[in-house]
Amino acid sequence: MNMFTKFEQIYAELKGRGSRKRMVAAWGVDTHTVAAAGKAIALGLADVTLVGDQDLIAKACAEEGVDISVFTIVHNPDELKSVAQAVQMINDGEGDFLMKGLCSTDKFLRAILNKETGLLPPKGTLTHCTTLEIPSYHKLLFVGDVAVIPAPDIKQKQVIMECLVRTAKAVGVAKPKVAIIAATEQVLPSQPASIDAALLAKMVDRGQIKGCIADGPLALDVAIDMESVKIKGLVSEVAGDPDCLLFPNIESGNVFYKANSKLVPGVKQAGMLVGAKVPCVLSSRADSIETKLNSIAMAAMAVR
């Protein structure tokens, strides 16, 4: 597989495949979900089942000018029950990945994390992977965790790293480079994030974390900007050229994500949960149709 550096290339790859992955949208009754799902079908990215109130789905389709017949509709007029039903359909093999519709993130996560009927394997950890296509950067960036784990310990950071690496590999990155972000390149006892970063980098060196190259701690400037690397005289396989950015906590990751989404012209993004039995598209209810479509494409690529 070639390494994809733009979402458009991922669209072309999915369209060229012989069979489509099957997406199940939980409480997929809103215009944004219907529009994104309809475009996903039209572009050949996935087949789609919408679980929710059929009347609301029909109204959303009419507003967006989407032919309702392109979807498989599973009627369930109750929001909470429809989310549980969508998760059960995944467990029953009736879909390859899940998408959050208009339901709240809390309800969506509770259904996924339910110990008896959910999608999280025993002792599993759910995390969030954001994919960014930034015009000023030369390839896709995979970023975590910006949405789920507030203050990850080193074991959780290892899981986040492994999920970022797995996502990057799903779009053709043979051996992803991971920059472990802190406020400085120095290992300082006063900054626990720098110590975790150094430990994680050494775990990669020793083969405890496999399939990637990693370096840390790295400040954000030297992580993503080769000119800063040269100015500071840093010697690193990763600095200036990472595929993945592992942030120390949810605040720093979320600020990076939202700063890019609001301040960088032309940025494109996608978001999904990783660590469950299947990829789960989780974008904000306020996200654009394009972001939801990119997220569907990433999830389809990540299906094992």
Image: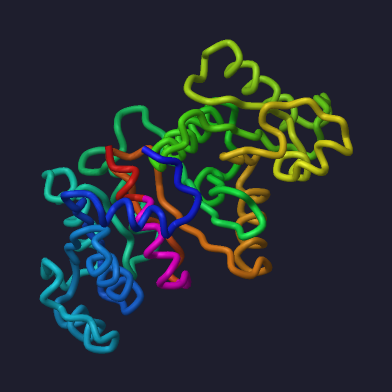
Q: Residue at x 79, y 39 (%)?
A: 183
| Residue 296 colored in magenta in the image | yes
Q: Residue at x 25, y 43 (%)?
A: 118
- Front-lying residue, 264 or 81: 264
Q: Quadrant of the C terminus?
A: top left
In which image quadrant can residue 194 be found?
Answer: top right
> What stretch of residues is rendered in magenta?
286-298
Q: Residue at x 26, y 50 (%)?
A: 97
Q: Position of residue 285 (x, y in %)?
A: 43, 70
Q: Position of residue 37 (x, y in %)?
A: 27, 68
In which image quadrant can residue 42 be found?
Answer: bottom left
Q: Residue at x 24, y 61 (%)?
A: 44
Q: Quadrant of the N terminus?
A: top left
In this view, which residue lies farthest toward the top?
A: 206
Image position of 92 with respect to 297: above or below: above
**75 horizontally vs 166: left or right:** left
| Residue 252 colored in magenta in the image | no
**41 horizontally vs 223: left or right:** left
| Dominant SS in magenta | helix
Q: Position of residue 36 (x, y in %)?
A: 33, 70
